[in-house]
Amino acid sequence: MQVYLVAFTIALAVAYFITPHIKNLAIKAGAMDKPDARKVHTKPVPRMGGLAIYLGFVLAVLASVYVNNEILGLLLGGTVILIVGVIDDLKQMSPKVKLLGQILAALVLVMFNIRIEWLTNPFGDMIYLQYLSVPITVLWVVGLTNTINLIDGLDGLAAGVSTIASFTILLVALQQNFWLVAILTAALAGSALGFLQHNFSPAKIFMGDTGSMFLGFMLAAVSILGTVKSAATIALIVPIVALGLPIMDTAFAIIRRYSSGRPIFKPDKGHLHHRLLAMGLSQKQAVLLMYVISGCLGLSAIMLNEVNNGYGVLIVVALVGVAFLGAKKIGVLKDAGSVKSH
């Protein structure tokens, strides 16, 4: 059996079987997600389910690969972001303190030399980042960490989108024989999918910031490992397209809040899933539709790996254009009012 299949199976089993125990732990610890004006659920639900995702991933990785400097840095950084998430799930942090925790976790990766050191110009030679390597790496990691965090608004949404994105990067890694990236994304997909069995509507437990930030962080970090193995821009473009749904939703939220004069970090009810619910879709229908969109973006990301740079640029431009037209049509760019709770 291929090692990545072993990693996937271990992560899936661990996350699935340990989640009920994490649920009981969350209830005892008082980590409960209470309903409010912005949230969809109507009764308190235990959160902090990301602990199950973390344990599934870590155990699968330890059982599947040799722990070298890169893997150690990856696991330590992931543990830091997990701690930040656990604290936030138990007692909500201010956005600034949470951001500092995310930056610290990203800097752990940099300390272990997991960083973006170069990019490939689609129309020319490689661009060596030199002194910009550290800030761009931190920006990349913090950015992706928050995109998954922000899309975690419906039962099963963040777990499902992360699973699809992980499978997408896994398939591209197999195409390019990046075995380490393949094993890591297989473990990530398995842990997210194992947790999803308990998280799909009606959810018995939420992943909380513990899970959403960990998934975003790991997807960002594993993508950086892809750049270490290849000078191709595709190593970063693939996860951007695969995670196109949460990335564009986050971008639209920033545009929407800025244009209406609201603080960028102040939550509102203008996200894509809020708009789909307002259009009359049920929670399950909205989540399944967003799975389909994520799947289509995943296929587009795989296509990017098979075409030359010129066609790749055209595909990305077309995807962005379609996204903006769709967002304008359903009102994602319009101000929906802000609420106090995150």
Image: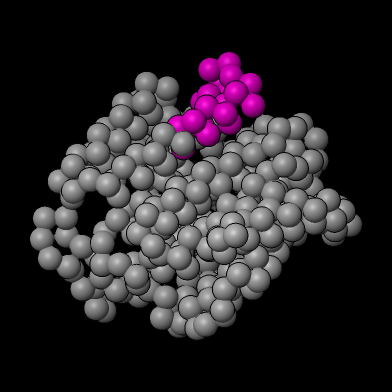
Magenta span: 275-294
Q: Main secondary structure of the magenta part?
A: helix
Is 3 on the left-hand or right-hand side of 139? Answer: right
Is 158 on the left-hand or right-hand side of 241? Answer: right
Front one among 32 and 219: 219
The answer to whether 310 is drawn above or below residue 268 in the figure is below
Is 280 on the left-hand or right-hand side of 228? Answer: right
Front one among 149 and 179: 179
Farthest residue in the top direction? 280
Which of the 4 quarters of the picture holds residue 136? bottom left
Q: Residue at x 79, y 48 (%)?
A: 46
Farthest residue in the front direction? 1
Residue 203: where, in percent of width, then height?
74, 38
The answer to whether 156 is drawn above or below residue 180 in the figure is above
Q: Residue at x 56, y 79 (%)?
A: 66
Q: Residue at x 46, y 82 (%)?
A: 112
**Colour setting:** one colour
Q: Magenta stretch: residue 332 in it? A: no
Which of the 4 quarters of the picture holds residue 204? top right
Task: Please indicate, yes or no, whether residue 320 appears anywhere in the rendered image.
Answer: yes
Q: Residue at x 60, y 70 (%)?
A: 64
Q: Magenta stretch: residue 288 in it? A: yes
Residue 209: where, in percent of width, then height?
63, 55
Which of the 4 quarters of the picture holds residue 329? top left
Residue 339: where, in percent of width, then height?
59, 38
